[in-house]
Amino acid sequence: MSVDKVLEWVEAHDKESLDNLIEWLKIPSIGTDPAYDAETRRAAEWCRDHLRGSGFEVDLVETAPPGGRGQPMVFGRSEAAPDYKGPRVLFYGHYDVQPPDPLELWDNPPFEPVIRPAEDGMGERIVARGAEDDKGQVAMFLAAMRGWKEVSGLAAGGVPITVMIEGEEESGSVNLERFVQSHKDELGKCDFVLISDTTMLGRGRPAITYGVRGLVYTEITLHGPDHDLHSGLWGGKCPNPLNELSKTLAKLWDDDYRVTIPGFYDDVRPLSDEERTLWKKLGIDEKAALESVGLGPDGDVGEAGYSMTEREWARPTCDINGMWGGYTGEGAKTVIPSYAKAKVSFRLVADQEPRKIFDAFKAWLEANTPKGCRWGEVIDHGLGLGVTLPVESRELRAAARAINRASGAEAALIKSGGSIPVAGLLKQDLGLDTIFMGFGLEDDRIHSPNEKFEVECFRLGTRSHAVFIDEMWKLGE
Amino acid sequence: MSVDKVLEWVEAHDKESLDNLIEWLKIPSIGTDPAYDAETRRAAEWCRDHLRGSGFEVDLVETAPPGGRGQPMVFGRSEAAPDYKGPRVLFYGHYDVQPPDPLELWDNPPFEPVIRPAEDGMGERIVARGAEDDKGQVAMFLAAMRGWKEVSGLAAGGVPITVMIEGEEESGSVNLERFVQSHKDELGKCDFVLISDTTMLGRGRPAITYGVRGLVYTEITLHGPDHDLHSGLWGGKCPNPLNELSKTLAKLWDDDYRVTIPGFYDDVRPLSDEERTLWKKLGIDEKAALESVGLGPDGDVGEAGYSMTEREWARPTCDINGMWGGYTGEGAKTVIPSYAKAKVSFRLVADQEPRKIFDAFKAWLEANTPKGCRWGEVIDHGLGLGVTLPVESRELRAAARAINRASGAEAALIKSGGSIPVAGLLKQDLGLDTIFMGFGLEDDRIHSPNEKFEVECFRLGTRSHAVFIDEMWKLGE
């Protein structure tokens, strides 16, 4: 197999690959909105047909539960060449996109992709909803697969890949776990997961993300009196749920911004000196990051003893994401509310278990019930396992070599404070580790108006995926 | 002057007095709503004409600022008889009413008054918006005045009364202070204020309210980053305004539920042993009160060392009346909000000054600014002075005697945790004390659908106001 010929092919067919992406981007696959169900399905069909064109066996598999809604899964596979001895790869991506609102903030209609000069004169970019997240990143894989098929005649150049491209990522992947459970036979044959849905460290600084945080997202209600009361006639006489909720939530952190829930840190994998040193060398400008969100150096606030990057990548958190109660309109209303509510979430790191943290939080709430009040149901709005891949894993090193060969640059090893629940799900259910080989930039405005993807990034990602196939072969040698 | 004849007259003309009230209640004087401006004025005219019919000199005085809106003040006076030596009374009331929404919860249209049997078989009640608050209570005064005029031929039986019945009470009395300032000559001649806008201790338990609490109502904003952030990428890295606002507000109270703002209690008039003993004798059922709002005995929560009634009547409070920030919709949104807001109010007791407390709170916020955050403007949504009248004052004793003579029952001396800003205003600007001689019941549903006023209460109030005139004469003897 000649990877060089594949790289030549993808370079020569650069425009064709971009045109393919543009064709895909024109299909408004807003998976969350039933009004777009037909379009979303069309985007899945487009992807199926394209993969078939590259020699994969592909079907659309329905994911809807009985009587429910679901977007079809693009589920495909390529066969191993007879002499292939490397691993089987599970490629995961998604073809659904975020709703494009607010429309008036787009410079061009979100589903009429345009290619524009990059603002800083560094090449060009594709502007459209989904340009990066995740059609653009999946399209890099598709272009590389097309190249291997054209050059070698084999799907994926003979590397066995199972492909799972879903249409529900932006609406919570509600049917994914059931899908995984019912396709364990095929998925269980895979050795690890490859996902392109993350960013680089910056322009010209490719990276592999070897860890993402987990998530526990809850909604809590503190009940006091059974109806709203006049604060003149009742103020000082009975518990005020807003006063008490503030007092209770305030106890979630100590003076060092450490979470006070008993056992919260028990399973936290400590940050190693090696990682600390490595991350320092990445030269991340924390001051500039604070400035970009309107904060000065005194905005460097968080768990004592760790830098901002260390806190994002290696430490768990607790945040109030929403809180409400009482009168929130104009002017004055002297009310003691009957209840107060908050959305409280935790970002978890390896090896914290979401269910264990959820239960610990519930127990903590019970133990801290304000006098005269009671808690309503603690709602679970989603749990996700955090994952961290050993940086010395052979697949990760293969991916790093692929990027290095494709770009000439060393792939930085980074983590992300965000959560990619599918990775936790595949780890938990199938024991699969995930390698995040992503080529987005932080300013790609995913989920926002004028989402874009740099053509340079697209090209680098395509080349990297092409070389990655070669690295898979080498793992078997 | 023969008060007995007046009492006979009012008894004989009971139906006429009720019919007058019903006529007044039919006018939808929703002062806050410009759509009802003409009706609101009509209610003022009705009141003016009625008072004129009782011998008062009365005018409607415009209160609107240049270019602004305002409801006319019913401003009247009666002359002292040549041999009168008692005080001049300032009678205050309001003819505007709360909007009647939600209309569908009314058993009869809110401006089509009906007389219904009381639920417990104890007489009858008038049901309509304004039936108690405050047309019904003002109508008791009007009926008593009519009686005196008919019997003695003199307005108010020769007692000098200045009458100020406004149309903006339910919309914050925005023009009242300016009115008071520009009518200081007339108002300054008065010796004290009489207001019927409070309740009795219960059915058959008439009361004089000798103190109401003051109010400081604020709205605060805590700013963090200049836009909402992704809680995965930023959680743990920078201040979260919701976390920090909860932590800050939690510091407003100590473990004994005492407000921690320095100087907060400096000017609080201590509760006397005498008041304590007196209030205990009132036999207020605090357990039943808690039950009525769905709380058990453990709902008896508040400042240590005081009973529920003592906390409402004699102690200041701090309450969060509203709080909001971040995502408050359905499901999960992993956001670190740019800001968080709260409405925080204080109920004050004599002799706390609202402005001083407002400033102390502002200074406290500054001193407790969370690291990396900043406070927005502290909005003042209304300040009101609390007032407490010495229970031994001769006017208060006169009012108590009037009630006693009219009802055969002792007037309980009670306070209220609510605020009646006009009383504070008249104390502050003119040095006038207020006597609250009110005949409402706690279940009169003022501001709610099916507002009602017991006919028994209306009669008792009318008789009490009639005797009150006699008591004024006696004060001069």
Image (tube, coloured by chain):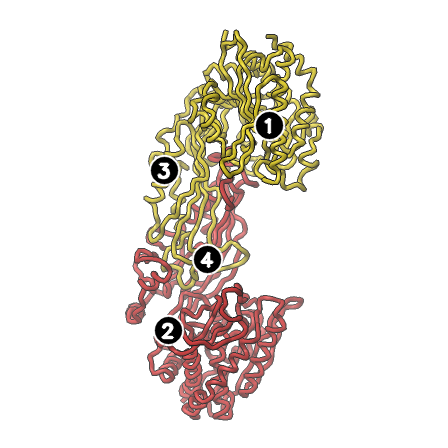
Chain colours: A yellow, B red
Residue type highlighted by circle 3: Asp
Question: Badge 3 is on which residue?
Answer: A359
Coordinates of residue B299 in the picture (x, y in percent): 33, 56
Instruction: Write down the quadrant of residue A262 in the picture.
Output: top left
Question: Badge 4 is on which residue?
Answer: B345
Q: Who's the residue at 51% across and 82% down the image? A: B19
Quadrant where the N terminus of chain B is found in the figure: bottom left
Which type of secondary structure does the marked residue at label 3 adopt?
Answer: helix
Distance from Cα at disc 3 to Cα at disc 1: 36 Å
In this rendering, position of residue A11 left or right of residue B280: right
Above or below, comparing residue B154 to residue A474 in the picture: below
Residue type highlighted by circle 1: Leu
Distance from Cα at disc 4 to Cα at disc 3: 35 Å
Distance from Cα at disc 1 to Cα at disc 4: 46 Å
Q: Who's the residue at 67% across and 12% down the image? A: A8
Question: Badge 2 is on which residue?
Answer: B120
Residue type highlighted by circle 4: Ser
Which type of secondary structure does the marked residue at label 2 adopt?
Answer: loop
Distance from Cα at disc 1 to Cα at disc 2: 73 Å
Q: Residues within 10 Å of mark 2 (few under 14, many from 20)?
A: few
Question: Badge 1 is on which residue?
Answer: A441
